[in-house]
Image (cartoon, grey):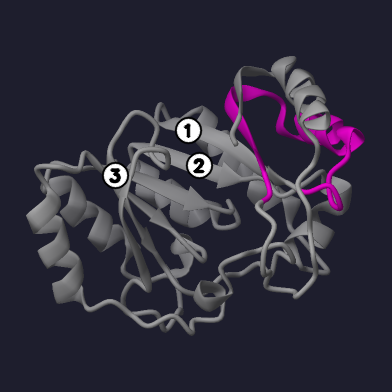
Amino acid sequence: MSNSRELCFRGLQKTSVIDFPGKVACVLFTGGCNFRCPFCHNASLVNRTAPEISWDGVWNFLRRRKNVLQGVVISGGEPTLVPFLADFLAKVKDMGLATKLDTNGYAPGVLEELLTENLLDFVAVDIKNSPSRYGESCGMDLVDLNSISRSVELLKTSGVDYELRTTVSAELHTLEDIREMAEFLQGGKRYALQPLNPGATLSGRSFTPPDEELLKQMAEVLEESFEQVLVRK
């Protein structure tokens, strides 16, 4: 699946009630990413400087907590880059736990394989911005928007629960950008807007969240195309 050197996870959130809708879950974080989003807060994961967690540590934790947890979220970094993803998801499913993938949608081939093998119960795709500003928001000069479109279309027809979501920054997102995004994505089941949390970023630049009124207007635009629109705090 990948030529990534990653051998294990680099982060663990032991309990979350917000990352996997409707489930108590843990979140495991992979290292490395094919994007360099300027507002990213996970520099130690993207740059692979966070220490790896041993596989014994991962499995011992899951065995201890499997009667408390209902699901496992795989986030990053970008999980579709790591070579162990499918095997790990299969083992988690064998434990009776539900699985959720957080991805930037840039590896539709990997996503399709995971969906075909029934290894995912929920997928969240981070949509970075409108087509005209995608490169600016993911830190790349050239972006293959067809990869994003293909991932979104795979989810729409997969039967697997999913959401598209955008982390919104006052510096990077306008109401017009949201309109362009809605047109590009052509509707769907659920969209979530989440205001950026100010703090240290991968690029060293400062970003701020939008005001509540603008977020409300953005949600209203998306409500014309999506069955459900959420604004997270």
Left or right, 112 with respect to 202, comes to: left
- The amino acid at mark 1 is Tyr
Q: Residue at x 47, y 33 (%)?
A: 162
Amino acid at dot 3:
Ala
Q: At x 80% / y 36%, what residue is drawn?
A: 211
- Residue 142 location (% of width, % of height): 81, 66
The span from disc 2 to disc 3 (Cα, nearest Å) is: 15 Å
| Residue depicted at 83% across the width and 30% down the height | 214
- Mark 2 vs 3, N-terminal side: 3
Q: Are marks 2 and 3 in contact (CB under 8 Å)?
A: no
6 up-or-down from 86: above or below: below
Give the number of the disc on residue 162: 1
C-alpha distance separating marks 3 and 1:
16 Å
Residue at 76% in and 18% down = 220
User: Looking at the rendered structure, which numbered label has been put on residue 25?
Assistant: 3
Which of discs 2 and 3 lies nearer the camera? The answer is 3
Magenta range: 169-196
Q: Earlier in the sequence, mark 1 or mark 2?
A: 2
Q: Which residue is mark 2?
A: 124
Q: Position of residue 206 (x, y in %)?
A: 79, 65
Q: Are marks 1 and 2 in contact (CB under 8 Å)?
A: yes
